[in-house]
Image (spheres, rainbow, N blue to C red):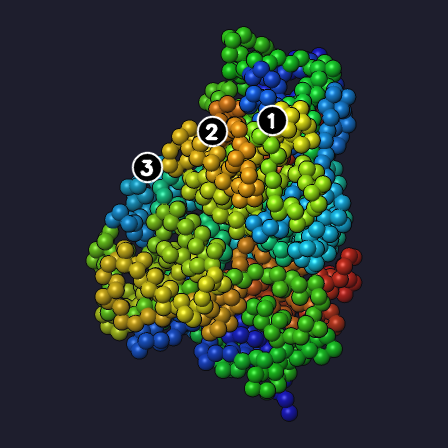
Amino acid sequence: MPIGQRVVFIGGGHNALIAAFYLAKGGFKPLVLERSDVVGGGAITEEFHPGFRASTLSHTLGPLREDVASDLAVEKFDCEILRPDPRVFAPSLTGQSLLFYDDHAKTAGGIARLSAKDAAKYTEFAASLAKISGVFAQICAITPPSIDKPSPEDLWNLLKTGRGVRGLGKYGIFDLLRWGPMAVADFVVEFFESELLRAVIASRGIFGTALGPWSAGSTAVLLLRAAADPHPVGSATFSRGGLGTFTHALAAAAKQAGVEIRTEAEVQHIRIKDGAATGVVLASGEEISVEAVVSGVDPKRTFFQLMDPSQLDPTFALRIRNIRSNGTVAKVNFALGELPAFPSLAGTVGPDGFRQSLSGRIHIGPEIDYLERAFDASKYGEFSAAPYLELTIPSLLDPSLAPAGRHVVSAYVQFAPYKLKKGTWDTRRKALGEAVIKTIAEYSPNFADLVEASQIITPLDLETTYGFTGGHIFHGELALDQLFTMRPVLDWARYKTPIRGLFLCGSGTHPGNGLTGASGANAAREIIRELR
Amino acid sequence: MMQHYDVIVIGGGHNGLVNAAYLAKAGKKVLVLERRHVLGGAAVTEEIIPGFLFSECSYVVSLLRPEIIRELDLPRHGLEILPLDGTFSPMPDGNHLWRMNDHAKSIREIRRHSRVDAEAYDEFSKMMTPMCRFVKPMLSMVPPDPTTLNPRDLKQLHFMMQRFRELSSDERYTLIQLMTMSSADFLDQWFETDVLKATMSASGIIGTFLGIRSPGTAYVLLHHYMGEIDGAFRSWGFSRGGTGAISNAIAAAAREAGVEIRTKAPVGKIVVKNGRAAGVVLQSGEEIGANVISSSVDPHLTFEKFLEPSELPSDFLEGVRRYKFRGSSGKVNIALDALPEFKSMPGDGAHLRGAISISPSMEYMELAYDDAKYGHYSRRPYIDMVIPSLTDPSVAPPGKHVLSCFVQYAPYKLAEGTWDDQREAFGDNVIDTISEYAPNIKKIIVGRQILTPLDLEREFGLTQGNIFQGELSLEQLFFLRPVAGWAYYRTPVDNLYMCGSATHPGGGIMGANGRIASQVILKEWKKPASQRGSNGAQAAPEPAAPAARSAKESN
């Protein structure tokens, strides 16, 4: 048992750090190579304007899968996890608004103002989602089975999952089968009648994807997310100091476990000899020979940028090329002179509740058709003039992020296609920022006047500056044909690759769904088994 | 003394007639009740304009199961399928894409647009064959219930799993993609020529309210591809005398087998006596008794119109209400006194004898969908045209022609106005669209018939104008069609069965639904009535009700 082998990780994102942590625990000597000067990948904190710091890209946590969270115990490495309640505030243009609390009954109370029927349905919905998400959580935790030679463990996992599925009962199973391929717009109609509520729930099925609420299959994405957090609107989990603090804590935990981490160490090439990974070559020219390489970067980058594709089996190469990984999300960080006002809150909570109500996620996208229209633009290579936005104001929970009395607003902007039909992202960047401000101003009239500075990150920036091929924040579209045994590609969904000693642990692998650490943890399990 | 039959089949469409024919051949005394004056349902030919025979709704034969043609000896009863050769896609820039049944010719034509695609097209066809081979057996099977531990269902599921595992890795890869992807994304992997992808993807949206970019449409593409795969043009073609001739041939076979058929006999309600279907009452008030009722009309009519809510379990009723119809297409049938002249290929020619597809680009197709999403018919719709009179002169006066146009999208629910006041505008819009490719069209029109989704509902009893009696979307296929747990041609009402397109394997002139349903009915015939018809297992919560167990195990 060649313990103590050197294993190199390409990229210092959360999945790589988590996988490295488990390998170190398993007795290996992991070395994490991060090209930028900080670890974290998509979860970093940067000062984007003097005195203003924000979670540059991802602005909330998954949250981490429970076992991963307890194994790495980030709290021990001065990372304070913040969980605001309410989790989501959703304003509409009609002056109405909804607040989603941890407590379903409390949420239902607010929903009742829109529809008594929906209020009653909401708790029922939460319950059925919780039930089904259990099964999905199970599926997210296992390694996709091999179809040709299922191992005893595969069969055991399938049996367990099967039991979980049967536990849903006849109607539960049929609902699962029905919902998966459904358009999320149809899904929410089965439960709710008020448009605002429908839109908030449905948005979970389209976030980060190239799907509109009317696209079939979007419900599967929603259910996948529910596996990470069964709450109807998902979680609103922050870390004090921005997500950078979180990944630094991961790094600290990893270091303590024996992981070596080097920043400003960009891997340029993976050395391959006789179909096996033998080492990596850094931009500096330095060569590191290793027993195994684990790539935390996306599959396309791994196989087409970091090695000579001609070394790949053509079928495999074709499938990797076919991965749909053109992003649809842009990110804008605003530095504000003061807290923006959301008048529609007045009808929902007392003035004393305003700050609290805004400290979670703010959903901008009041109707299903609004979300669909936002999507339409992207189909024709244009970004939405009225985009679907998710805002956070992290400086409310953590004043240290902005000068006293000032605030940081972080906005996910959808839809912003990687490929523009007219102009380039460099020429259109400003226009995107303006569209976002204009949209927010519809709900927060004083917003535009408060903006002191903004940082606009287009899908192209995500690729060039942060290394997400196609600007896809999930390393590849979350779609029925790219999940589970198809993620990243059929026959190679078990974190191994056709190159001996080369593994994947990033979001491009199963389940690959936000900052949950599931991909990294699953990968570590397989890698350890392989290398032992 | 009230008349009494072994079986009453509601609806004289192709599935109803097939169902009746098989039951009669098995010695049952069968009565078919058709609401209209003519048989065929949506597979019908009528002389709307003097001298012109329109295949009003369905206009090509696609998937009619060969075993049905054989077993019912349809050719002897007058069925004659004429070739429909190829697909001609004119383009606004004066170019075109013309694929023919002659594979080599098609490849040469595609090479004109892209050498790469010409090669890919060959591979593509090779790959689609095993795909269709995989799916075809499922078209003639009763879907298994994935939720029971019933040995018979498990065996079927295992059988399917085995067949999947027997596929090569590449075949699995493609099959999973076909089952989950959008036809646009799927085809993007294979081809680069826009018009080729647009025209091919068109068959992925027919009968659905989805755009070519929506997941799930790749399956529909496969569903329609299957016809072509039967090789020869036998499976894609016209029937001499119009599509109605198919229904008439099946009707003739049925009558020969002893089936009694009554037209202008609209059913008012299904009579249920202590939980069992016992007959029907016509709108005329006449009551007719039967041991078994087999309904070929859609679930909305069968369960919400012909039955009382009190006669059905609430969860089933909920499933029926949830079942998605939302028709998305219309039909414009045009009588011409000359042939259309296409800019990109003037004059008469073989290109007019096949399908003519207005699907110039992917963006065109997607824009057509976007209009419909927001409640407007497509300003520039996808149109699939045929001129049957070129292949079958009997449908038009000498020298004159019939132009049949299938038009998508036309949403059943309009954002503004009603179909009654937008019908003509819709028709004009279709003709304007065609005239952009065949400028002479307006000058040669003798008359036209416009069928909006509302007309399809009113005249042909297709709820919300869905031509397949319900969307062909993944959540409404196989063991989920029409209602999860009720994909077995049975219903919660004993002795009441379904045999129409709303059942597996769905729409198109296949006849499979009617045939499989007849097998289910006959299988259960000898059982005590308490175990017949309704499949208790599907209604009862876990564990499956004993009645259903025995119902299954005993066959």
Q: Identify the subunit bearing mark 3.
A: B
In this rendering, the answer to whether A443 lies above or below A117 is above
Q: Position of residue A81 (x, y in %)?
A: 73, 29
Q: Amino acid at mark 1?
A: Ala
Q: Secondary structure at mark 1?
A: strand
Instruction: Determine the chain carrying the residue at label 1.
Output: A
Circle number at residue A54: 1
Q: Is residue B390 left or right of residue A94?
A: left
Q: Residues within 10 Å of mark 3 (few under 14, many from 20)?
A: some
Q: Quadrant of the N terminus of chain A?
A: top right
Quick check: B1 left or right of A376? right
Tell me the element at label 3: helix
**Quarter occupied by residue A362:** top right
Crowding near the residue tagged with mark 1, few <14, some 14–19, many ≥20 C-alpha atoms within 10 Å: many
Cα distance between the residues tagged 3 and 2: 31 Å
Q: Left of B229 or right of it: where is B8?
A: right
> How busy is the neighbourhood of tag 2: few (under 14 within 10 Å), some, or many (20 plus)?
many
Residue at label 3? B115
